[in-house]
Image (cartoon, grey):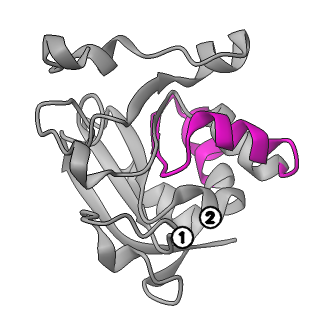
């Protein structure tokens, strides 16, 4: 199985907790004004990689704390990413997924698409919501705008409601909290 990616970034410390490898997927329907990765929007761009080869490359990294799926929009390729996520999770890798969709939208999408449900369930953290340029805030951890949330996915799926990770509150100014 193949995945279409815009690139791979190793040794990131800004895309989730610890030292991470970031998989930037290709293709995004959101086209957020001011997006940090506009080159990832075109679904015809990027390059194709085999899932197993990508997993081997990621797992060969020394000192890896986790992997982040970013974009583009990861849920546009939920089937391929759910396969990659399963391989990584078998090895105890922490998974962060960024999405321009909200958790509520994703749980609704998951009702009709098992791959969306599988990818969402594999995530430890979800940074959800579109980038909103008017809410840009460089003080919020792992996010570009204040509307985005850092969600504890396992707890949220178990409870049926959004549970914010304690990381969500780091860096927030009191008037934003």
In the image, residue 73 above or below residue 145: below
Quadrant for the N terminus, please.
Answer: bottom right
- The number of numbered discs placed on residues in the rendered structure image is 2
Q: Which residue is identified by label 2?
A: 76
Residue 6 inside the magenta-drawn segment:
no
Dot 1 falls on a residue whose secondary structure is loop
Residue 105 inside the magenta-drawn segment:
yes
In the image, residue 95 above or below residue 53: above
* Image spot of residue 86 (x, y percent): 65, 42
- Along the line of sight, the residue nearer the viewer: 64 or 78: 78
* Image spot of residue 50 (x, y percent): 58, 73
Tell me the number on the disc at residue 29.
1
Task: Name the residue located 59 percent from the left edge and 45 percent from the top edge.
Answer: 85
User: Is there any visible trace of residue 135 in the rendered image?
Assistant: yes
Dot 2 falls on a residue whose secondary structure is helix
Where, by quadrant of the figure, is residue 107 drawn? top right
Quadrant for the C terminus, please.
Answer: top left
Q: Is residue 133 left or right of residue 68?
A: left
Q: Residues within 10 Å of mark 2 (few under 14, many from 20)?
A: some
Pick out the residue farthest to the bottom: 44
Where, by quadrant of the figure, is residue 37 drawn? bottom left
Q: CA distance from mark 1 to mark 2?
A: 8 Å
Q: Are marks 1 and 2 in contact (CB under 8 Å)?
A: yes
* Image spot of residue 51 (x, y percent): 59, 65
- Along the line of sight, the residue nearer the viewer: 88 or 17: 17
Q: Residues within 10 Å of mark 1 (few under 14, many from 20)?
A: few
- Along the line of sight, the residue nearer the viewer: 89 or 150: 150
- In the image, which is nearer the foreground, mark 1 or mark 2? 1
Task: Name the residue located 56 percent from the left edge and 34 percent from the top edge.
Answer: 123
Residue numbers of the magenta segment: 84-113
* Image spot of residue 164 (x, y percent): 45, 16
């Amino acid at each position: 199985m193949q995945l279409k990616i815009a690139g791979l970034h190793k040794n990131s410390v800004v895309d989730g907790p610890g030292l991470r490898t970031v998989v930037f997927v290709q293709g995004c329907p959101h086209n957020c004004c001011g997006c940090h990765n506009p080159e990832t929007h075109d679904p015809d761009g990027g390059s194709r990689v085999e899932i197993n080869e990508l997993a081997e490359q990621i797992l060969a990294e020394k000192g890896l704390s986790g992997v982040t799926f970013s974009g583009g929009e990861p849920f546009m390729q939920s089937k391929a990413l759910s396969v990659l996520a399963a391989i990584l999770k078998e090895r105890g890798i922490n998974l962060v997924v960024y999405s321009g969709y909200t958790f509520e939208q994703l749980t609704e999408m998951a009702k009709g698409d098992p791959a969306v449900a599988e990818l969402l369930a594999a995530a430890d953290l979800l940074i959800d919501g579109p980038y909103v340029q008017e809410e840009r805030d460089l003080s919020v951890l792992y996010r570009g705008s204040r509307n985005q949330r850092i969600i504890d996915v396992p707890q949220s799926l178990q409870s049926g409601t959004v549970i914010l990770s304690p990381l969500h509150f780091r860096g927030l100014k009191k008037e934003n909290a």
